[in-house]
Image (cartoon, coloured by chain):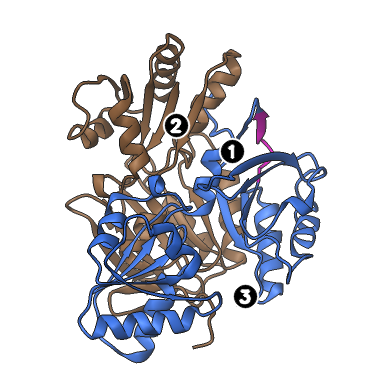
Chain colours: A blue, B brown
Amino acid sequence: MLYVVGLGPGEKEKMSLEAIEVLKRADVIVGYSTYVRLIKEFVKDQQIVSTGMKQEIDRCEKAIDLALSGQDVAVISSGDSGVYGMAGLVLELLSKRKEQLEVKVIPGITASIAGAALLGAPLMNDFCHISLSDLMTPWEVIEKRLHAAASADFVICLYNPRSKGRPKHLARALEIIQQYKSKETIIGLAKDVGRQEEQAILTTIEQLDETQVDMTTVVLIGNKETFVAGSNMITPRGYPL
Amino acid sequence: MLYVVGLGPGEKEKMSLEAIEVLKRADVIVGYSTYVRLIKEFVKDQQIVSTGMKQEIDRCEKAIDLALSGQDVAVISSGDSGVYGMAGLVLELLSKRKEQLEVKVIPGITASIAGAALLGAPLMNDFCHISLSDLMTPWEVIEKRLHAAASADFVICLYNPRSKGRPKHLARALEIIQQYKSKETIIGLAKDVGRQEEQAILTTIEQLDETQVDMTTVVLIGNKETFVAGSNMITPRGYPL
């Protein structure tokens, strides 16, 4: 059996009971070394196969091979394994290899949801997820989605907003978004959610300090009704109050 | 202290450790009666304040009053409390009442994420959430969002897709979506996720039997690359395989 397990944002308390149970019972755990460290506390006897960044295909192939040999294998992913995570890759590889293997996806709390809880309640009305990484999606497609999402006033969650290799993507995304949303639109930054150094920052499109954004940040851009009250970012659901 | 707790889709196994701990420790639990039943197993001594459907404002006001009186109160919401849930309403009411009260939002697994895990991995690329309920969002705004999301080929998660009071909304939404997405586009229906009767149905825009969709269903509409392999709905992330 092959499990693909979403760890949530990083602390054990935000994992589901099911995810913890699967990891405890698995024979082998396969994951990116940073995430393996997060679960070391409660996996003790399992074989660990950890690989470095950008070795996702290799990691999933290994996990499939081990599961096909009869072991119970858990591939771990941060957040939810089905949101830009490992679940799709495992299922795609299996389909390509034409192998029969039972796969169970164990959902987790993805970064936008964990970040939103830290920021208040910014996702109370319709919202989108857009990854600004163009490693696997052409930048033109990403731009088209930014235009569409901003023009219909979705709340927008940006994943992979800015990295050393892509220092300009966030600025370009905000240029597009500003064609439709005002510069006073509220932005929430949720950084390192579920870790000791977690941080919530409230700002606006105009006042955003881009250097505060890195790959551990999820950027939540409000709709035209989103407001700040105290330390909370709130998008109204629409109740008459 | 006031907690707003996301229960996840319905079974204890998909709740976070943090959510369970908060519910066990709370003095009072406030929620819609159906959700209170879901947690009866592990809350035994707490005062329960349960109210019927469509009494959200009343329920949140009561929770705020109880918390202001010094009790630890947990308002429960299905899925994630920040996604069309109770978190925003609690924070909005507090802001309106100008009361000072510490509020902590405890995230949970929302229906789209739980449904996606049941269906395979449909959310591996950019996606939107749109609620088809026009109780609190004008239908024109919903239509605009459907046009935008479909035109940029987002995967689309429809919440509140169809009810007795809104039997035609799903059909109208699919008419709009079909202006941009082909009629062979894969649709996944995740019904009653996390409950004994949970069910995954794979179909296409063309072949969808609308009568299978009700308020316990989340409807996931793929992008142009989404495919079915075995019993799984898969949206490729874009890895070169």
Q: Amino acid at mark 3?
A: Thr
- 3D distance between C-alphas at marks 1 and 3: 29 Å
10 Å neighbourhood of mark 1: few (<14), some, or many (≥20)? many
Is B100 on the left-hand or right-hand side of B230? right
Name which quarter of the figure residue B79 lies in. Answer: top left
Disc on res. B86: 2
Is B59 on the left-hand or right-hand side of B41? right
In the displayed structure, would residue A125 be above or below residue A68?
Answer: above
Is B158 on the left-hand or right-hand side of B191? right
10 Å neighbourhood of mark 3: few (<14), some, or many (≥20)? some
Picture coordinates of residue A218, whole percent (x, y): 61, 53
Q: Which residues are magenta?
A: A221-228
- 3D distance between C-alphas at marks 2 and 3: 35 Å
Q: Which residue is mark 1?
A: A119
Is A77 on the left-hand or right-hand side of A169? left
Which badge, 1 or 3, comes first in the chain's sequence?
1
Q: Which residue is mark 3?
A: A137
Q: Which residue corresponds to the image point at 80% horizontal and 53% vertical from the top-left?
A: A179
Decide whether the magenta segment is chiefly helix, strand or loop. loop
- 3D distance between C-alphas at marks 1 and 2: 15 Å
Q: Amino acid at mark 1?
A: Leu
Q: Quadrant of the C terminus of chain A?
A: top right
Q: Is the C-beta separation of discs 1 and 2 under 8 Å? A: no
Q: Which residue corresponds to the image point at 47% horizontal and 53% vertical from the top-left?
A: A10
Q: Viewer-nearest of labels 1 and 3? A: 1
Residue extending farthest to the bottom is A97
Residue A68 in view: yes
Picture coordinates of residue B51, whole percent (x, y): 30, 22
